[in-house]
Amino acid sequence: MQPTFSIAGLGKLGASMAGAIASRGFNVIGIDINRHTVELVNAGHAPVQETNLEETIAANRERIRATLSHQEAVLNSDLTFVTVPTPSDGTGAFSLQYAARAFRDIGRALAEKKGYHNVVLSSTVLPGSTRYGLLPILERQSGKVCGPDFGLCYSPEFIALGSVIHDFLNPDFITLGEFDEKAGEQLEGCYAQIVCNAAPCRRMSLENAELTKIALNTFITTKITFANMLADLCERIPGGNVDVVSNALGLDCRIGRKCLTGGLGYGGPCFPRDNVALGFMAHSVGAHADLAETTDRVNRALPERIIRRLRGTIQPGCTVAVLGLAYKPAAHVIEESQAIYLVEALLKIGARVVGFDPQANEAARAHLRDRAVILGSIAECLAQAEVALITTPDVAFGELKVEDFRSMKGSRTVVDFWRLLERQLAGQRDVHYIAIGCSADDKTNADRLAALWKDAAAGEENDSAIGAGAN
């Protein structure tokens, strides 16, 4: 018999999972404590903004319904995914406040249910959270025992905002932490029917799965930060170009090209907090996470370092256009956005900032209020600016031509963090183009290296002279 799924928490992940699972032919019951969210889903609409979510829910409306009642959902489904928020607390750890509330309500529903039910936590948590923090709540509220009476798994999703549905249905692999074999087998069988790409499934303990999730995210941030270090070095050597270096490095199968493009740092609702949380976890168990802590420190220092690098170009009173305000292209989220941090740093040195983002204008306007001017188009920004910063590799910015920048004032300086416009703008006389990660002054860089190694050259000449005298 085909299983029915319930999903507790209809945010970006939960609502997208509901739509994705329904699109594969399964019935899904969504659970949320927000009545408006429930009403939107039951009316066939997306409760949150996410790529293709509105269309997916509308197309599968007959298989998706939502409720405020955990009991109703649990009693009428076979497996419950829990996708509630786990925000960072004051220590850097992930709070279980919302997860504990969901597990309490699910436990009470389990007390009324006859037959087996599997509970799957998908939210990001630290090792030990599922077994020692949340399992006791289920057993206490249900009066039942995990294993014989109900199942428990930890199975995080490796998704990115803007492509949640695609990523959920086409994962690179499935991480499945299981309390016991029965729960793991059931969940693996469900995934085999849901995903589109026959992704490999790795079954493991709850704690190993919890660590795998946060380890993957922190490893990616380390790779991004390494690429930004290479970009800084490439700016200081003659002919330096971080894309040339990264393209070569990426050919090594031990490294790979993904996440190795030097530019701005990482941001968003997941990556920055995961390094902090891993540091907290390591210290709590007597281990060390120096690499994760250093990655976080270097990433947070990047905007101020960039401003120091551009102080000769950006003076107090200068108007700077910041093109790209979200934490990544094609997203409306500005949480931990490097572009927003750059805006803050620019304001601190007395620059005037105008900004534009194809998706994130409203969020940026609400955050910055009257400290910066968020405009409705790229052209409006450039017409007011002396300096333009291209801070996200958005398609709209990559399509700009040299003519678009001729409306700028003063120096007409374009700082391109992703080298989107190198072909269009490099060498143009009326636009000063700075490609971050590339050498802008080969002579100065060559002189610097020559000075660095002059003693070695002198030493070689002395050795030759000594050799000649011996003959």
Image: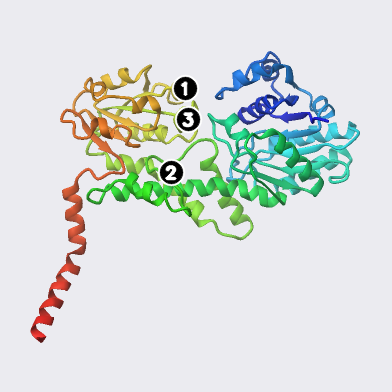
- Give the vertical position of 185 relative to 85 (above or below): below
| Relative horizontal placement of residue 235, taking residue 213 as reference (left or right) | left
Q: Position of residue 52 (x, y in %)?
A: 57, 22
x, y percentage for residue 194? 69, 33
Whole-angstrom CA distance, mark 3 to mark 1, is 10 Å
Along the polypeptide, which appears first: circle 2 or circle 3?
Answer: 2
Q: Which residue is mark 1?
A: 366
Q: CA distance from mark 2 to mark 1?
A: 22 Å
Task: Tell which tag, 3 or 1, sits nearer the viewer.
Answer: 3
Which residue, given by chain and number where applicable, does mark 2 sit on?
A: 300
Q: Amino acid at mark 1?
A: Ala
Residue of label 3: 334
> Which amino acid type is shown beneath numbered disc 2?
Arg
Q: Secondary structure at mark 2?
A: helix
Label 2 – label 3 distance at C-alpha: 15 Å
- Residue at 39 percent across and 39 percent down: it is 264
Circle 3 SS class: loop
